[in-house]
Amino acid sequence: MTILQDVVDNINYIGAIAVFLIGLRIVVVHSNMIKRIMGLNIMGTGVFLFFVSIGNVTGGMAPIVDPNAPGVTYINPLPSVMILTGIVVVVSVTVYSLSLVIRIFETYGTIDQEELSQMARRNHHNDR
Amino acid sequence: MRAKLTDIVFVIVFVVLVIGVMNMPTDATTAAPAYNDIINHYLEQGADETNAVNIVAAILTDYRGFDTLGETIVLFTSVVAVSSVLRSARHDWKFDDDE
Amino acid sequence: MTMNDIIVKTITRIVLPFAQLYGVFVILNGHISPGGGFAGGAILGTTLILYTLVFGRKKGSKKFSHRASEIAESGGIMLFILIGLIGLMLGGSFLTNLDAGFPAGELGSILSGGMIPLLMIAIGIKVTSTMINLFNLLIDEGVHS
């Protein structure tokens, strides 16, 4: 029973880990670069969920304070602020990788990692 | 075979991470370690010190405004980097869409 | 690259002003309600992306040209730094708020918080122009080749 209680208490964190690992599996298994960038985004979402869950307080209010009502419990506002930085970084990384993928497609005609490494191996072989 | 092995590795990693989380101090109360003195200061004196009701906005632009400046510079840098990678960022652009 | 669907065009024409008004509302109410510069700027940028997607790159560029987005891009950061420098001159350190003499206003009303609404507007301009700029850069590459 106690382990079930632990799972229920930490369900946010377990969900965050699951989302993170789904993204990581996409990055590892697929060789299509667009799918890999999507996986990177999903990994980022998992990290955001984990971070925001740290600031959660059961029964707490959103941190919009009301000076006329003292004694109200508010959630931790700091992780919410920090996550804004994380979202900005993930957007920047996504757009930059997409632009690199466009360049790679124009140069080599493929966005498949396996084909690209085969191409590189062939070129290396021909040079020698 | 290889895909199955990858999935097994991922299940093992999941179990290890969940065990790690179970040993974290993750009680969702005000006694959690992340809910420390500075959070209490923000929530109690934030409205007086910045005169803004939304404490998230107060932290974002007042207490940690320099961090937000860096954030906007990250966005600016991403635009600069993308337009340097994609060569078509020209002013004399001819649109060939019909409308 | 335009959509020739009458339903999409009509609904976009109807919905777009309300969505943009909502984005401006979220930016201006950032200090008294959930939201702020990043969220409101994302909403505004998304409406511009929707307009470009539905009516084509040419019309979209007429509404918000490359030149305008360049000015908004650097103007947002410039406004942020300018407000910070005002705090540095009058209050002693970069981004000083109430000690630098920014009007405090009444707690909880829309004119409160000193420089916080001004910084929110700067961030909103910045995020809006960044979103539409990045989208246009990626889309132009597709049209070109």
Image: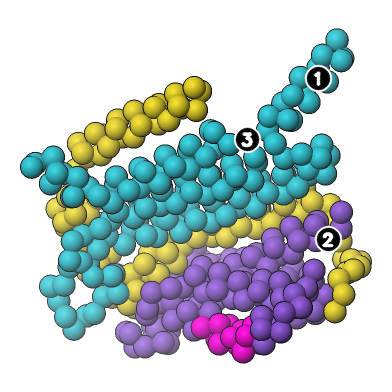
Question: Which residue is farthest front?
Answer: B1
Three-letter residue code for mark 1:
Arg
Q: Chain of mark 3?
A: A
Three-letter residue code for mark 2:
Val
Tag count in the figure?
A: 3
The colour assigned to chain A within the rendered structure: cyan
Q: Is residue A71 visible?
A: yes
Q: Which chain is purple?
A: C
- Residue where numbered disc 3 is placed: A31
Quadrant location of the N terminus of chain C in the rendered image: bottom right
The colour assigned to chain B within the rendered structure: yellow
Q: Residue at x 68, y 33 (%)?
A: A113
Three-letter residue code for mark 3:
Ser
Task: Judge the density around disc 2: few (<14), some (14-19), many (≥20) Cα neighbours within 10 Å.
Answer: few
| Residues indicated by labels 3 and 1 sit on the same polypeptide chain | yes
Q: Quadrant of residue C91?
A: bottom left
Query: Does the magenta-highlighted stretch encompass residue A10?
Result: no
Q: Position of residue C121 (x, y in %)?
A: 55, 76
- Magenta span dominant secondary structure: helix
The Cα–Cα distance between marks 1 and 2, rounded to whole angstroms, is: 32 Å
The stretch of residues the image draws in magenta is: C11-22
Horizontal side of C35 relative to B15 (left or right) equals right
Vertical side of C32 occupied by B63: above or below = above
- Residue where numbered disc 1 is placed: A122
Q: Position of residue C73 (x, y in %)?
A: 68, 67
Quadrant location of the C terminus of chain C in the rendered image: bottom right
Horizontal side of C129 relative to A21 (left or right) equals right
Sequence-earlier tag: 3 or 1:
3
- Residue where numbered disc 2 is placed: C143
Q: Residue at x 16, y 56 (%)?
A: B29
